Amino acid sequence: MNFGIAQSPTPAMIAAATRAMETALELRPDDHVLVVGDEVCGACPAAFATAAERYGCRVSRYDLPPSGRPLDAIPEDLAALIPGPSVVINAIPGHTAETPFRIAWLNLVERQGTIRMGHAPGISEDMMTGGSLDVDYRRMQLREQLMLDLLDGAESLRLRTALGTDLTMSVAGRSFISDLKARPHCCINLPCGEVYCAPVEGTADGVIMADGPIGDEGVSPMPVRLTVAQGRVADVTCEDLVWQERIGRHFRHDDGAAMVCELGMGLNPGARLVGRMLEDEKALRTAHVAFGDNRGFPGGNVQSGMHVDCLVHLPTVEVTREGKVATILSNGDLVL
């Protein structure tokens, strides 16, 4: 498919796409790359396609249809392209209403066990021009290894912020992983840059004061207080009652939507706090707790048509291991 002259990528975007695919997807000239795009993402799909073509790869392109949105299932002609490619790039919108489609598509691709996938729901051109996709991957890898070492063997975790977040959860037996390298059975986000895990279901208790973006709603004009009991959202309050209802409805979508499903911490030095979760959740000195589906995470078994991230700034994170408590982040800064 032709992405159009009006959506021609800049050289900087093509260079950023090349670096991301080389590093995070281990792109090879003999790869067959499928770029799934959407016109609302501007020149981003074309940047990845052009970068792959110049790398010597065979490239296929697919635009999501403009009609019949939001999608709740995989279009038949898109599903028919799998198996086939060795690399898939999803440069598509990140609307919460299309979560069922995205989950089904990710599951279909990951089940092949042969495809390295970069998932970019909500990507924008500015992320590819001096932003979170245009970064020093070596620097991220150094921080990644430090954090994974500090989290290794953790049995429980406590997340706190000065604003009032105080949440505890069990992570016993749940591996922390990073998203800096795609594996055939596990996709990564583009831009990448987080360490995360699926906490043990039903163990999270406490309060989250979300002062960053929530899902695709952007940043609330006032912090949103989420009370969590036995791993589920028990109460949502905000001084802005319109926002209180906007956020609360996500957790009523289905039975799994209110379940804590992820704890993540940002690694990306180029990620900015711009009100788009795809980028914000990767930013240094932030953490996020997600609710809903986590079946793609190691150990995760929460099923839902939702996956809603809630971001907090300047987190302090403590881990308990063999009865000893260690602080790994203090007001967002890494503690060595």
Image: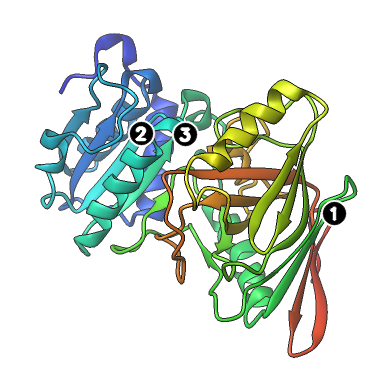
Which residue bears the numbered disc 1? 331
Residue 35 pos. (x, y %): 25, 36
Q: In what element is the residue under mark 3?
A: helix
Is any atom of residue 213 visible in this view? yes
Measured Cα–Cα span from mark 2 to mark 1: 33 Å
Residue 137 pos. (x, y %): 52, 53
Quadrant where the C terminus sits is bottom right
Applied colour scheme:
rainbow
| Residue pictured at 63% horizontal, 83% vertical | 153
Residue 204 pos. (x, y %): 68, 64
Q: In what element is the residue under mark 2?
A: strand
Tag 3 near tag 1, CB within 8 Å? no
Query: Quick check: 292 left or right of 266?
Result: left
Report crowding for label 3: few under 14, some 14 to 19, many 20 or more residues within 10 A (C-alpha). some
The amino acid pointed to by label 1 is Asn
Quadrant where the N terminus sits is top left
Which residue bears the numbered disc 2? 91
Mark toward the start of the polypeptide (2 vs 1): 2
In the image, farthest residue toward the bottom: 322
**Which one is nearer the viewer's eye here, 203 or 314?**
203
